[in-house]
Amino acid sequence: MPAASHRGDYRSVIFGNKASGLGQDQNPVQPLPRRKSGFRLPDFRFLIGVLLIGASIAGVFTVLNLANKGIQILTATRTLLPGELVVEGDLQPLTINADRLSADYLLAGSIPESGLIATRVIMAGEFVPKSALGSAASESYTSIVIELANKIPGSIGPGSVVDLWSTAKSDSEFEPPVVLVGGATIVRVVESEGLVRDQGNNVEILIPRDKVARVLEALSTGAEVAIVPVSLPIGG
């Protein structure tokens, strides 16, 4: 009996120590740490900024495309009078989106180096019609300075269209007034010279060449000459 008990104790010691040894050597499985997800919700302010920048760029391209599709019509930089030589420096281009105007108005690059001649009054800032310029009108007009019997109205200035009237003297009486030149154009009002400068009664007037002899004849016979406005420039 004592021997059996010794064997049982021996077994228990061996297997017990082995079991305990196995329990100590075995490592428990540890859970892996969770990784934080890399997906984040987009920043809406950033998206709105990108959309605004894109819309701005698209708007610029749209404006540039519209400008490139426009036409350049020439406008007068100053008042141009009939018979006056018009060169490129007297006009400036203005881009507009109206192709239908290209048939009636002068386009940029269409003025020859020799220039063109105005056939009617063209006001400053006005689109220049093709019908208002010609190449042979320079021989049709000339300007002369005349002294008027009446005071020049303040509304009359360069570009005003007037009728030139004459009243001839016969003995001690005046004959009925007649129109010497109809539709003449005022080139400038000649200011009087002296200490006090005022508008005076002298004007430089543009008239057809075939009317010059008639005007000079009236002036040489002492006829009184007056002007009557037909049309005034805008702002005149």
Image (cartoon, rainbow, N blue to C red):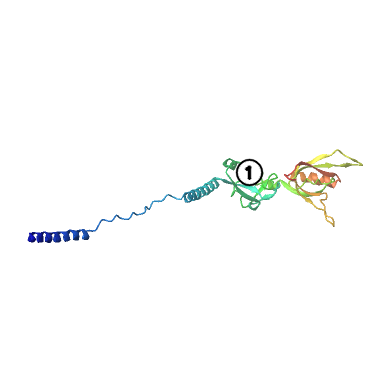
Which residue in the rendered view is the most extreme toward the top?
A: 176
The percent position of residue 131, horizontal first and vertical second, equals: 65, 42
- Which secondary structure lies at badge 1? helix
The percent position of residue 51, horizontal first and vertical second, equals: 48, 48
Q: Quadrant of the C terminus?
A: top right
How many marks do you count on the picture?
1
In which quadrant of the rendered view does residue 7 lie?
A: bottom left
Q: Quadrant of the N terminus?
A: bottom left
Q: Residue 188 versus residue 78: which sits nearer the camera?
A: 78
Which residue in the rendered view is the most extreme toward the front?
A: 1
- Which residue is found at the position 50% from the left and 47% from the top? 55
In which quadrant of the rendered view does residue 179 lie?
A: top right
Up-down relation of residue 29 to residue 126 (above or below): below
Q: Residue 147 versus residue 101: which sits nearer the camera?
A: 101
Q: Residue 89 versus residue 155: which sits nearer the camera?
A: 155
Q: Which residue is mark 1?
A: 130
Crowd band around label 1 with a 10 angstrom C-alpha radius: few (<14), some (14–19), many (20+): some
The percent position of residue 42, horizontal first and vertical second, equals: 44, 50
Q: Is residue 147 left or right of residue 67?
A: right
In which quadrant of the rendered view does residue 132 lie?
A: top right
Q: Residue 119 versus residue 96: which sits nearer the camera?
A: 96
The amino acid beneath tag 1 is Lys
The percent position of residue 123, horizontal first and vertical second, equals: 69, 46
